[in-house]
Image: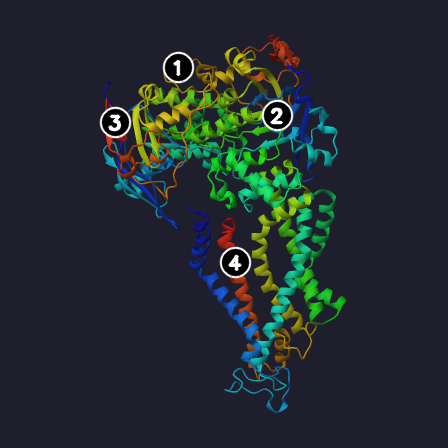
Amino acid sequence: MDSSKPQRSLIWIKFKRNRAALFGSFLILIYLAVALLAPVLFPGNPSAPNLMKSLERPSLKHPLGTDELGRSILGRILYGSRISLLIAIGVVCVGLLVGVPLGLISGYYGGKIDFVIQRVTDTLLAFPGFLLALALVAVLGVGLKNTIVSVGISMVPIYIRLVRGCTLGVREQTYVEAARAMGTRNGIILIRHILPNVLTPITIQTSLGMGTAILFAAGLGFLGIGVQPPTPEWGAMLGSGRAYLFNAPHVATFPGIAIFLAVLGFNLSGDGLRDILDPRFK
Amino acid sequence: MMEFHSLLSIRNLRTCFHTYEGVVTAVDGIDLEVYRGETLGVVGESGCGKSVTALSILRLLASPPAEIKGEILFEERDLLKMSVDEIREIRGNAISMIFQEPMTSLNPVLTIGEQISEAIRLHQGLTRQEAWAKAIEMLQMVQISSAEVRVNEYPHKLSGGMRQRAMIAMALSCHPRLLLADEPTTALDVTIQAQIVDLMERLKEEIHTSVLLITHNLGLIAEMARRVVVMYAGKVVEEALVEDLFSEPLHPYTQGLLGSIPWIGRKMETGRRQLQEIPGMVPSLLEMPEGCRFHPRCPRVMEVCKGEEPPLVQKEGRRILCWLWK
Amino acid sequence: MDPIPLLQVKHLKKYFPVRKGIFSKRIGWVQAVEEISFHLHSGETLGLVGESGCGKTTVGRCILRLLEPDAGEIWFEGEDLLRMDAESLRKVRARLQIIFQDPYSSLNPRMTAGEIIAEPIRNHTRCSRKEIQDQVSFLMDKVGLHPEQAHRFPHEFSGGQRQRIGIARALALHPRLIICDEPVSALDVSIQAQVINLLVNLQEEMGLSYLFIAHDLSVVEHISDRVAVMYLGKIVELAKDTVLYSSPKHPYTEALLSAVPIPNPKMKKQRILLQGEIPSPINLPKGCRFYSRCSYRMDHCREVDPEFKDLGEGHWVACHLY
């Protein structure tokens, strides 16, 4: 009698019935495959200009056309997926590494330390997230690393809030009290008893957060203060394509679609995960 | 034996649920009879199907996933064949129900008075004022002090015992012929439980209602019921008059159940602190044992129990589902 | 009687503030535990019984200092737990354990049964992996679980089995005293008997002492040597179980006992019905707490809170009738 099997297969059955989640993870899979296989799919340098061929319409040689410098848009989108994936992972890591411990500490210990962390979080949350990222870039400067750091920091308060809230709930569970009664140290209670039980909402938030991170980074790129040319970045491509919107709409359209699909994939999967793992939010 | 007229008779009731993990049969072909004016106790442990039986009677289970088969004759009419409007006319009127948790079964945003008078207006066609006066009268009947004030209060302002009284007032407001009481005192303290039991017995006399009392508390059954039905894993395993059941339980499960409850004075009587135990645990509805469902836990198991379903044995007005009495 | 009790609680007090409004203004106190004193001998089971909200669970939590009491002394093995620093308290908790009511929320759903049982051992000793594994197997066997199930997660066990895991966890460090906080009230009747028998057998085998907290009078009577009855934060009566159940002195105990349904239809007994509900424990009036529901009340009772007196042979009562 192994009753853990139905538990796991139940999640799988629910997942298979959730079409949105299925479609979302399909998009993410394609996205990951593209990022991984970009050099195979597009041999050659996506950043090498060829001014002879600037702003060409889609053709067999360049299926999505070329941009103002004559570079294949398809190639740049393929390589751009690697940049946006890098940003998304980096941003989420920053958010998790800073936000989760602070949220745990804030929720578990309460009192003064909680007060301080919460006031800082309140202040950060008072700015719209993108504005905060923008302000941070203004301080730190442009570039890939700074984009990751500033978008990451702009997401930290979301994680703190989420983890703190869940910790408050888990802290009241009898098994945490039991652990204290067994003489377990606080640090171990946090890692062994509380963290594993707040992982589900963190996972969901992480999936949604990847989408947001791609969007924010693209926004910064679009404004020209994100990742700098000639690195193929979707936001920056969109931004430079804006000037040719009327005579060469494909230059801006295709990167836009790429951003849209990637963000959609993460959001659908995140929502689907929430439906499957956390029925309370239904 | 006195002659009783049947009020509710359940024939071969089978309620199953279609779940992700397969079809779960919560009630598997049971027969029950409730006579006019009597209290029938239904006793069993969690998952034995006793609550599902009550919910099936009033067709309160969402379907799907639930599927109810068989016959439930109430005053010679089959509740399962009725239209939605007809069954709604029965609910809260001819048959009403009290639930275990009075907080979740009262609407938190309506006052007590609004909830009781709504039921009265719906079924008795009284005017608003008349229904309101009736609601106050009902609250007085269940001994809620200063009923004129309480009638305007919201459920959360009342204590657990008061809420259960309000629930009873609501259930009895249309003088039902049958009251389904599903663990009516389980959530209450014993001194409050004693008040509610006393109240239910008194009201039963006053308005001549029959009661189907569902509980896991054998003490409560002994005090309130005339006849008892013992359920195990979706089946009725024994049925008897309450005195017979307690003095001479025939089914090994009933015997085990009676042996496993502590009661005041038992330790002195038997001289030992150990209780008789039923080994093992209630089987999962998904993995019912072959043959008799109790056989893996039964101290008197025989070879035949493992393979074949036990027969229903009639013996001196009792029913036992067991090979031992064949 | 033994000269030194294993546990001695003196004048224990725990108040909870009641707050209201947007500024969380304190509008009063709930006297969850008010001036409670009792002792418990080695090898003994003391039952602590009372209705919901009487503070019995709070007493248990205060003894373990899972809640900080406001006043009083708690002597365990000759040391006052309330004057201990965090580290010595952590060490004492090896010998002072607890079993919880809810077998679902008291086990971490992300840990296996083996990890749960091993946790106290890992906290307090430096055993090798192998030694811990052996001890876990031994404990699981002792509480009637199959050691092969150690790698399973709590949701794969039934309620009764989960309670057994909780008991094994409490036994892991060979405690002297276990506080049992409603250990069987969430279980089915047949499973309840199994767990009661397990507790009784373990006590005989290992010389454990129990503080058995429950609301079910029949269960408490069954397992206890002495019983204390609580009402609104105070112990109103404490006596040997046979004495308390056969000749209760306090009107509340009397009513409580008469309210318990007896599983014997031939014994139709007279119930004493208490009038009214348990009053709210916020800002109680002076005088006896049971005044509003008592059928023997006198004017004196409204004015003066009765003392907790010894009527002889360890029968304590807080009532002006005596």
For mark 2, what is the residue?
C281
Q: Residues within 10 Å of mark 3 (few under 14, many from 20)?
A: some
How has the structure been colored for display?
rainbow
Whether B87 is drawn above or below C201: the answer is below
Task: Identify the amino acid type marked 4.
Answer: Asp
The residue lying toward the viewer, choosing from B270 and B320, is B270
Q: Residues within 10 Å of mark 1 (few under 14, many from 20)?
A: few
What residue is at 60 percent from the left and 84 percent from the top? A71
Q: x, y percentage for residue B231?
A: 34, 32
For mark 1, what is the residue?
C268
Chain identifier of the residue bearing label 2 in the image = C
What residue is at 50 percent from the left and 87 percent from the top? A60
| Badge 1 or badge 2: first in the primary sequence | 1
Task: Identify the amino acid type marked 1.
Answer: Lys
Q: Say if residue B91 shows up in the picture.
A: no
The residue lying toward the viewer, choosing from B1 and C198, is C198
Q: Residues within 10 Å of mark 2 (few under 14, many from 20)?
A: some
Chain identifier of the residue bearing label 1 in the image = C
- Real-space Cα separation, disc 1 to disc 3, in angstroms: 31 Å
**Closer to viewer: mark 3 or mark 2:** 3
Query: Residues at badges 3 and 2 in contact (C-beta under 8 Å)?
Result: no
For label 4, the SS is helix
Position of A102 with respect to C253 (left or right) is: right
For label 3, the SS is helix
For label 2, the SS is loop
What number is the disc on residue A271?
4
Q: x, y percentage for residue C98?
A: 60, 32
**Closer to viewer: mark 1 or mark 3:** 3
- Figure quadrant of residue A187: top right
